[in-house]
Amino acid sequence: MPWRQVATLAPHPMGEPIYKICTAVALEEARSAGRFEGSPDDVRDGFIHLSRRDQLAGTLAKHFVGQHDLMLLAVDAEALGEGLRWEVSRGGDLFPHLYGPLDLAHVLWLEALPLGDDGRHLLPAGVAA
């Protein structure tokens, strides 16, 4: 695995959730198992890709354009412990990466991400930038 620059402090306010975007099918599989093991991209990269609120629109635009059946999971970042690392990624920004499975007990809420008329995903009220 290539070397990654890791931040020692989380670059977001304490108590604010971080987010996972996944398919409805992947969420159902995770519910059956009680935990989310990661998407094929997560498994390939060796960690679960997560985003801060202000990174969601960019993540959706880069990786999920036009994709139906997506779910947004709000995750309690503080509950993830030492498996959560903040690493430099897209555009030099720090992104949250979870090394290990996501226990669904740490999901605060979840909501569908429908597509708008313009083909972009609609973020829930309170999450949209």
Image: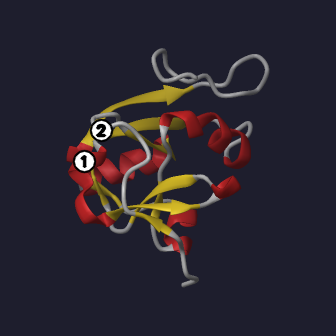
| Dot label at residue 16 | none
Q: Are marks 1 and 2 in contact (CB under 8 Å)?
A: yes
- Label 1, secondary structure: give it: helix
Please name the residue shown 52% across and 54% down the image: 95
- 39 on left or right of 80: right
Please give the residue where the numbered disc 2 appears in the rendered image: 14
Closer to us: 68 or 108: 108
* Circle count: 2
Please name the residue shown 31% across and 46% down the image: 77
Amino acid at the residue labelled 1? Glu
Q: Specify which label sits upstream in the sequence, 1 or 2.
A: 2
Q: From the top left corner, tell me how far across and down residue 109 is, in percent.
A: 32, 30
Q: Residues within 10 Å of mark 1 (few under 14, many from 20)?
A: some
Please name the residue shown 50% across and 63% down the image: 87
Question: How far apart are the alpha carbons under marks 1 and 2?
Answer: 8 Å
Q: Is residue 87 visible?
A: yes
Closer to us: 115 or 99: 99
Q: Residue furthest front?
A: 8
Q: Quadrant of the C terminus?
A: top right
- Above or below residue 100? Residue 72 is above
Q: From the top left corner, tell me how far across and down residue 71 is, in percent.
A: 48, 36
Q: Residue furthest right?
A: 118
Please name the residue shown 65% across and 28% down the image: 121
Q: From the top left corner, tell me how far across and down residue 123 is, in percent.
A: 55, 24
Q: From the top left corner, tell me how far across and down residue 67 is, in percent.
A: 68, 39
| Dot label at residue 78 | 1
Q: Quadrant of residue 126?
A: top left
Q: Residues within 10 Å of mark 2 (few under 14, many from 20)?
A: few
Q: Is residue 69 visible?
A: no
Q: Quadrant of residue 96?
A: bottom left
Q: Quadrant of the N terminus?
A: bottom right
Amino acid at the residue labelled 2? Met
